Amino acid sequence: MIAALLVGSTALVQAFGSTSSSRTFVIFLVNVMLVVSLQAFIGNSGIVSFGHVAFMGIGAYTTALVTIPSAIKASQLPDLPSALANADVGLVPAVALSALVALVVAATFGGAIIRMTESTMAMATLALLVVVHTFFQNATTFTRGSVGLAAIPVRTTVGVAAIAAIGFVLLARLYKESGPGLRVRAAREDPLSAASVGTAVARTRYGAWLLSAAMMGAAGSLWAQSVIAFNANQFYFAITFALLAMLVVGGRTSITGAVAGAAIVTFLTDTLARVEQGVAIGPWELPRITGTVQFVIALLIIITLILRPEGIFGRWEIDDLLRRLSPASRRARRAQTPAEPDRQQEVPGPPAALDVSASSVLEGEQVAKRFEGVAALDGVDLEVRSGEILGLIGPNGSGKTTLLNVISGVYAPTSGTVRFDGRAIAGMPPHRVADLGLCRTFQNIRLFPQLTVRENIEAATPSGTGDGPIDEVSAWFGLENVQGEKAVSLPYGMQRRLEIARAVVRRPTLLLLDEPAAGMNEAESDELLENIRRIRSGTGCSVVVVDHDLRLIMKLCDRIQVLDQGRTIAVGAPRAIAEDPAVIEAYIGGPSSKSA
Amino acid sequence: MSPSEFAQQLINALSLGSIYALLALGLSMVYGVLGMLNFAYGELVTIAGYAMLAATYAGAPFLVVALVGVLAAGIASVLMELIAFRPLRDASFVSLLFTSFAVAQLIQGAFRQAVSVRARGIPVPELFDEALQLGPVRISVLSIITAGIGAISLVALTSFMRRSRAGVAMRAASADFTTARLMGVRANRVISLAFLISGLLAGIAGVLWIARTTSVNPTTGFVPVIQAFIASVIGGLGNLRGAVLGGFFLGTLEVFLQALLPGSLLPYAQAAALLIVVAILYVRPQGLFGQRTAAI
């Protein structure tokens, strides 16, 4: 859609524009390419990178070195190695080579920083900018430092820029909607739950980093071939600031926003540059003012952040408008019934006393977890049999969630072993545990709030592109009519169902549910009970349920394990547990109190 | 490197390190309390510089000039928070970062417009140019003063943070803002206090920095603040003690790299220091002195 707009405006400019407006238009198109490349990382991963301009510079210098005619090159850079001194390539090879060099640098540096936390990574990208800038300024044999290089042939015409810009936009769009792109966005929303449904967070982010760096290098190349000359001082904070401004003003995560931001800032810069020359407004002549561009853009950023923190376009993409207007979606919305689960979908089959085999799917032996001085888990043995529903209960602070965290890979145990399907998994990161077939939900719902219902479930599928029973699982949980809604806008009960649906779409062998009934009334709990039973009988997976709703636990579970202060105090069938004096004491009080 | 040269560089390291430590501390303090990285922090150093310039033109003796610089930075810091950051109190980390970036550009632009793009000289006492001779080692008076003032400031701050009510409240807020508020700590006061103290720190660091460079321009604060950012990250963001240690570490690294690198590679001293820091962070992502936080 944006592509169409760009084509349209290009035609207009070609037809009616003067040379100066043509020039501005090319600047705008190059800015679009730069900001879309930057956004491919910042928008999708949510991490601010100050260093991307380094890749732009690398692309620009690479291109300059291989496109400046040899004779002129020799006079500017007399000490170049002959391979470079003689290089003279056309537009496409220059762009490709620039992207490649940027990619190599990004691969090296990115490998070092990708496991850092968000704020540390932002600082590291700052370091990248400074280091590369220092290199540009001082490696005068290759760059002529602050004096700069000149006579780069102008190959980025309006037509070339338009085609390239459209290409960049399409590429960014393709990436955003692809499997890896969806997973990076899921990791942006909630890295922990993304990992718990199989996203290797660092690795996926690395992919976004590499792609955006290569794009930035290519954009830098096209930029160089439009400005004819540049020097080392240009790849530093001024342009970083301008690009970030475009993102902030237009919309950090929306490609439409990025393009709009580029338009706004380019237009402002252009107009203000004229004003700075001293312009006459009516009878008044404005004096020459320097620095207005920076000043105004800074103000614009601050105002935008105060009034519309997500940018003018927020997360809205222009294609969303088309989708809403399309006849198919209009029909769907009219036919939409209020979101109630389809009760006809009950899977018949015997409840709890199912064919629970004796083999165990999960074994934990003497699992212990200490935090500084506190022993949250003090040697717990756990066994989950294949096909069973095991309840895990205990007073607050007994270690239930800690145990789930250790099993699912969020924590490594201080000691003890955990075996899943025969494999030792203690200390494995969450996404690998998920890959092996162990999925979980969280006590405080951890969805991907700004992603749609469908995207939430899709992100959990093995490839991230939807190779899984998304539609069936959605129907099971009554989510088929809200597929396009953002997760954050769903009512609480539906959010819980969505979280479970997301964990189930991978057909896990073992499902861990952490307080799934929290905040539910009796009717909702009964429904949840049916859902869990349906999951077990429908897929044969084993389930561990942690909850405080004893009524639910008693009705649902084949066996129950009770924890207190990090230790197991009872394991057995529901009846036996209800009558166990140790359990009663832990939950209610001393032996003199009446039992429930 | 001979022992006397080593001693000399060590003093230089302590001197430069003090400046970085003060700045890193100020940055970490604000990060700890508000969760934001204040990109405009360097501008406080610039403001201190221009305040010193104004005081110098007014004919004040250097001691007064220095005091004016420190106070100007403190006041500017509090104002910055009130005007630019308070309206965005609950905004995301990234929004605050961008805002502070914008504020930094605004201030730089303002100075460029109001004063000049070019540097303006600030006269400093001749005492600073002198050096003491201790045996084979020549120590510049300025280095001693810088290191000394740095140490005094840090000690004073530590005792303030440990003993005074306001200081304890700030440390509590740094550790857990919500709980501190529930315990009766006044949010706005703590935040303003954090900005005031970090501003004063920037002012002291600024005065010491300008005493070395003897001039001020719109981008004066920029160079040391990048170092301060890196230093606070090495120390573990939000970790006050780590920030100080990180500052000294970075100062030492820079000084010794400059002393040991061959002439042709000298311009790369800062870049080399940064790369070393990134390598450290690769091995220890939580910084040298930070704590590895749990996954949740």
Image (cartoon, coloured by chain):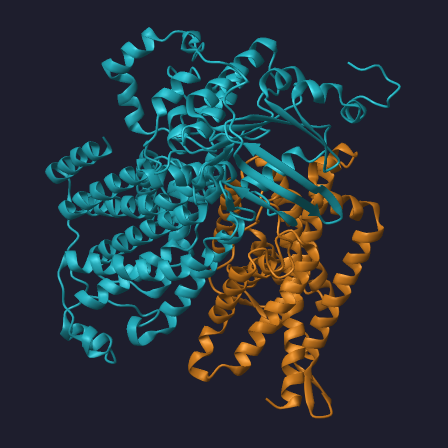
Chain colours: A cyan, B orange
In this rendered view, identify the residue nearer to me: A435 or B187. A435
Where residue B180 sits, quadrant-wise, is top right
- Regarding residue A479, the answer to whether it shows in the image is no
In the image, taking residue B162 as reference, residue A249 lies left or right, namely left
In this rendered view, identify the residue nearer to me: B177 or A161. B177
Where is the C terminus of chain A found, in terms of image quarters? Answer: top right
In this rendered view, identify the residue nearer to me: A284 or A588. A588
- Regarding residue A86, the answer to whether it shows in the image is yes
Identify whether A429 is placed above or below A230. above
Residue reaching furthest to the left? A15
Residue visible at 47% across and 52% down? B109
Q: Position of residue A46 (x, y in %)?
A: 45, 42
Q: Position of residue A325 (x, y in %)?
A: 27, 17
Q: Position of residue A372 (x, y in %)?
A: 72, 49
Identify whether A134 is placed above or below A382. below
Residue visible at 44% across and 79% down? B265
